[in-house]
Amino acid sequence: MYRKLSQGWLKHLDFIVLDLLCLHAAFVFAYMVRHGIRNPYAIEDYRGIAIIFTLTDLLLIVFFSSLSDVLKREFRREFTTTLVHTALLAITVSFYLFSAQSGDTYSRVFYYTMIALYFCLTLLTRMLWKVVLRKSPIRNKTVLFLIVSSQNAEKTVEDIQKNSHGLYQIPGMAVIDRDMRGRAIAGVPVAACREDVIEYLKREWVDEVLVAVPKESSEELYQTLIEMGLVVHIKLDSLKRYAEQTQTVEYLGDNMVITYSLGSVTLGQAFVKRTIDIVGGLVGCLATGVLYVLIAPFIYINSPGPIFFSQTRVGCNGKKFKMYKFRSMCLDAEARKAEVAVACGLDGQMMFKFEEDPRIIGSRILPDGTYKKGIGNFIRDWSLDEFPQFFNVLKGDMSLVGTRPPTVDEWEKYEAHHRARMSVRPGITGLWQVSGRSRISNFEEVVELDRQYICEWSLWLDLKILLKTVKVVFYRDGAM
């Protein structure tokens, strides 16, 4: 999967919001100190400088990585980092005021009071919020699986719990030198042994893996884990470079590890991608509302029942979620899936995709054996059934661009290397869809395209895929 700076910017959204609240609290208080109890946002000049402060603060957070490792920073480092951030904010805004020749518009007492107060509020708020997060039982933590030996299992667990600052949730471990399945070590269940650890990781939701076993006995295991697309932390017994992998050295708890991942993104890139997803998700949800009014009557007339269809899909690193679509198939479509797969010769295939599916609403087989399309085919041909997935994008289950999420039964058939395609957040569209859409039916080709997307990812690549998606939908017979 992508190795995101500081475990991903979404986990710092709370810090960003708190930072902005501190900024505006300092802004209002400093204004009142200088000008009395009045609303500064009602004054055009001060409303303008408030916007400048906000945008500058966001840019510094994103592009200067001010929140990098924020949960790992103790007071001294937090003090220094916050001081540097505040100084950059003051210098940047001062430069703007000088360039715009508007420095005389604002009181120096207001400006200096605000900067000093912002520093104090932000430092205090960050330290207090970290205490709250570390004690919170419901916090969204990274799911970390341990592969250890019986000798170092207890020490490894205790070390992670003590020194990881609450970043990780450990659902289980594998002990590779003894069969200890069913037991618990330091409160963590032993879920697998050497023989079945890969099978376990293929089926369960795991974000990252820490391997703390000797290289000599586990080289093949290392390679398999990396091929699965997991973020793999390996204690520094080996510095071997694996193909296509991003390699970094860091600390996990008190362990110095070498970390392999298919790719990596900066905090700024992740911020921009998620921002695009949110904007696109909002627009898509509005479009979904309009489409509902237009196509819901046709769906109901041809097949009375729910307009929307939900299905459990497998998302990033095996996390299951409900994916939404406009219903284009009959109500018993899921129950008939196995029957249709056998009849169409698709039984046992990794992907189930059949253009002349008899379960599609309004479709039927004519007396001469030809397939007559219905309203469900129209909805599917024009990808209208996909629009409710913009709600999944807003929730964070999916992205606008990514890899397609498999069904649970498809996921259960995956080999180890297939898992790599699910090492990123799934998308409404992706490289596979714009590289031939329905023409690519070989699952290994799909996996290869998805690995290519993950390894070569950039914001520009996402933009190209979005533009190609529009073309593919409107020119459905043309391969891209």
Image (cartoon, rainbow, N blue to C red):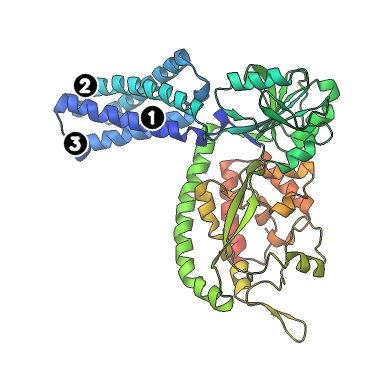
- Is residue 309 placed above or below 278 in the rendered structure? below
Q: Secondary structure at mark 1?
A: helix
Q: CA distance from mark 2 to mark 1?
A: 23 Å
Q: Earlier in the sequence, mark 2 or mark 1?
A: 1
* Residue labelled with disc 2: 108
Residue 202 place in picture, x, y as percent: 74, 41
The residue shown at (76%, 64%) is 338
Q: Earlier in the sequence, mark 2 or mark 3?
A: 3
The reply to whether residue 138 is in sight is: yes
Would you identify the image quadrant in which residue 207 lies?
top right
Kindly report which numbered mark, 2 or 3, lies closer to the viewer in this rendering. 3
Would you identify the image quadrant in which residue 163 lies?
top right
Residue 110 place in picture, x, y as percent: 22, 24
Could you tell me the amino acid type at mark 3? Answer: Asn
Would you identify the image quadrant in which residue 456 lies?
top right
Q: Is residue 92 left or right of residue 320?
A: left
Q: Secondary structure at mark 3?
A: loop
Residue 255 place in picture, x, y as percent: 66, 17
